[in-house]
Image: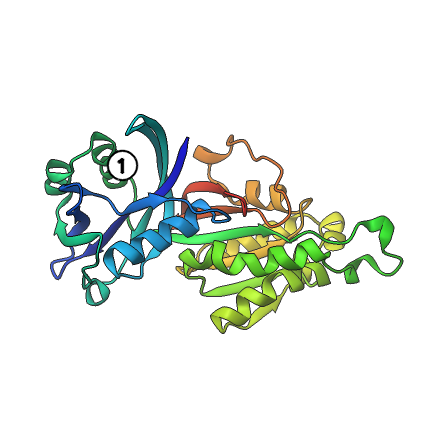
Amino acid sequence: MIRAAGAVLWRENSDLFVEIALVHRSRYNDWTLPKGKIEDGESAIECALREVREETGISARFTRQLQTVEYEDAGQKKRVKFWAAHCALDKSEFVPNDEVDQLKWLSAAQAIELATYPSDKEVIQEFIDGDQHTDTLIILRHAKALERGDWDSDDSLRTLSELGVEQAESLIEHLRAFSIDEIYTSNYTRCVQTITPLANERKLSFTQVPNLNEENFEYDPERSISFANALKQDEKNILICSHNPVIPTMLRGILNTKLKNKELIKLEPGDAWVVHRVRGEIVGIDYLSIGN
């Protein structure tokens, strides 16, 4: 199975109409969405961001995950994960390269008509059928910490393990595509250590929030829900880092009726829920693993 990833790269033109980018690959003489094979050690979303940049020269802000498609490619099965990726009109200039010689900005109907492959047509239609303008709220479980039994001090001071430190560094690339604007974290050391590399890379300060830690959650779970509910109204891309006991309750507390019954699997260290909002209303939720 060939694993690949790509994006529906879109912008608004001067009349505020949505336009979608299709690229022409001279080698295949096809019109397609930007996409490519996932490299060793690379997550799907890292690949999608890289492929967009390599094939178009454009830096985009990723939002909601679209469908995963499967098809035959030269006798091999290929599975491609797609995201929506937005770029500003003044940052959408195409840079030709060895693989891609043309890019066209098209209406959705034109893009569906021109796209060579049925799977690309399906993904474009899904994008158009959903919400285009969304803001992202990432709810992240802290990276791998030392085991409780190996820590003989206050649990709030328990640090990341060696693996956790590596995971925290890797989050820079895993979350780069979402262009995070603000970071909030539990004040426990393992959470602070998790988000510090990302905050430094993005040149962001971060806010430590005691209502996101495990002790305050046990005392009053509603505090974490109230905090997340207040943040979800902000039209920014926001990251919250907390603990596994806190996250499911906090997330269920902010989901609307339509999404209340979504299965919330247990997050592994460094994994996240990516929540998509339109003017404070949650319209979708994706699971993001640092290994995928």
Q: Residue furthest right?
A: 152
Visible in this render: residue 167?
yes
The number of numbered discs placed on residues in the rendered structure image is 1
Which quarter of the rendering shows the N terminus? top left
Pick the front one: 29 or 278? 29
In the rendered image of this protein, does residue 125 appear above or below residue 240? above
**Residue tagged 1:** 123
Left or right position of 266 against 261: right
Pick the front one: 285 or 34? 34
Identify the residue at image location x=48%, y=58%. 173
Pick the front one: 187 or 50? 50
Visible in this render: residue 188?
no
Left or right position of 225 against 153: left
Question: How did the renderer colour the structure?
Answer: rainbow
* Image quadrant assignment for residue 207: bottom right
- Amino acid type, residue under disc 1 in the picture: Val
In the rendered image of this protein, does residue 264 appear above or below residue 150? above
Q: Residue 276, image x and y in percent? A: 41, 47
Identify the residue at image location x=43%, y=52%. 46
Q: Residue 161, image x and y in percent? A: 73, 56
Q: Residue 131, image x and y in percent? A: 30, 44
Mark 1 secondary-structure assignment: helix
* Image quadrant assignment for residue 130: top left
Q: Residues within 10 Å of mark 1 (few under 14, many from 20)?
A: many
Q: Residue 193, image x and y in percent? A: 66, 64
Left or right position of 13 against 145: left
Identify the residue at image location x=64%, y=53%. 142
Pick the front one: 99 or 66? 99
